[in-house]
Image (spheres, rainbow, N blue to C red):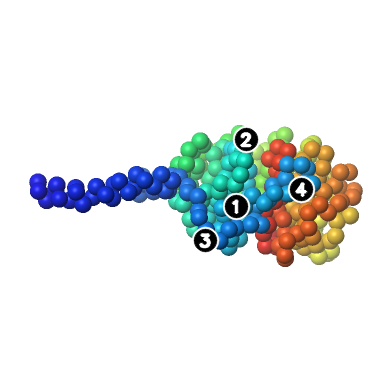
Amino acid sequence: MRNFQFLLILLLPCFWACEQVQEAALLDLSSNVVTGGVTESPSTPSAEIVFQSTDQGQTWQDISSGLPADLSPTSFLVADGELFLTTAKGIYRNSSAATKANWKKEMSLMEPFSNISTGSGNRIAFNREGRFYQKLQGTGVWMPIFTNFENPLVRSVHTTESGIIFIGCDNGLFKSSDQGKSWKHVMENGWVFKMVESDGVLLCTNESGILRSTDGGENWDLVLSEGGVGITVETIKGGFAAITCCENMESRRVRTSMDGGLTWQAIDADLPPSLSISSIQEVGDYFYCGHPNGIYRSDDRGQTWELLQPTIGEKVFELSVSGEVLYAILRDKGC
């Protein structure tokens, strides 16, 4: 008994100290449930990583305060009222309604959890090795899922509005209609990076270009190919927009489709050709394009383009949209 009392006295300060760390991330090793995120306090202020515009791209605010200065962003997602910034060092999040930047790192999702899912449903963090954690909506809790998925080299995760889950890998696309209990290899010809849906049509990027499905992802047809890979695809009013790599022109092309992805029209004649065009978005009556020169805007559906914001250094802006708000992350050139 005396030994127990002595041990308890020694441990009490530790318990008290743990209670004071209100924002520390928790890791429950017994249940593999991870929770919480803490605001990082870098030794040097960060800037020029994430930007926001609320006036149709006329002005841009740097909302990077609180992020480590040496981050190299890989992607950006606006979902569930939060901003998610993925990097090689982990995932950072911030409220999209915040009046000032308050970035928090998902401390339990450090390397190599550096990717996050798109589409509907709760967010899913994943890595290239095929480990997945799902964020319970409205909480800071992440729980392991898809433990039966055995295909490595994962590139993307997308959940459709009907709850179908797709995982894109180097060896094709896998589909689950039962919340990840079982998986079907629905497409074997190359990787899938990005997927979107509109009016029953699914489009995805592929090493051959842009693929299309109208039967819930069971079968896929190549609808846009210019000898190179598909870079990105987005939904716009009445259709889709996509960027592909054109082998003959040694440039990336920007196109739109207003018939469900069947036919495509170029909207980049007034854009300087480049192999590093990164993104295409629509807000209101404007198109926006992330380009090595900076951020371009078009008010005539892509016939002409105006440079709104020059780039910084040798990087390129990658654009995202939430309602009427534009976001841009400054990242290295490339896919």
Considering the numbered disc 3 on the image, is that residue within a helix, a strand or a loop? loop
- Mark earlier in primary sequence (3, 2): 3
Q: Residues within 10 Å of mark 4 (few under 14, many from 20)?
A: few
Considering the numbered disc 1 on the image, is that residue within a helix, a strand or a loop? loop
The residue sitting at 32% across, 49% down in the picture is: 17
Q: CA distance from mark 2 to mark 4?
A: 34 Å
Q: Residue furthest left?
A: 1
Residue closer to the observer: 166 or 328: 328
Residue closer to the observer: 34 or 81: 81
For the residue marked with disc 1, what is the amino acid?
Answer: Ser
Contact? badges 2 and 4 (CB < 8 Å): no
Label 3 or label 2, whichever lies nearer to me, is 3
Considering the numbered disc 2 on the image, is that residue within a helix, a strand or a loop? loop
Which labelled disc corresponds to residue 65?
A: 1
Q: CA distance from mark 1 to mark 2?
A: 34 Å
Q: CA distance from mark 3 to mark 1?
A: 12 Å
Above-or-below relation of 331 to 160: below
Residue labelled with disc 2? 161
Quarter occupied by residue 68? bottom right
Q: CA distance from mark 3 to mark 2?
A: 42 Å
For the residue marked with disc 4, what is the amino acid?
Answer: Thr
For the residue marked with disc 3, what is the amino acid?
Answer: Ser
The residue sitting at 52% across, 48% down in the picture is: 104
Residue labelled with disc 3? 43
The residue sitting at 45% across, 51% down in the picture is: 108
- Mark earlier in primary sequence (2, 4): 4
Q: CA distance from mark 4 to mark 3?
A: 29 Å
Give how far across and how far down residue 66 sits, in percent: 56, 53
For the residue marked with disc 2, what is the amino acid?
Answer: Glu
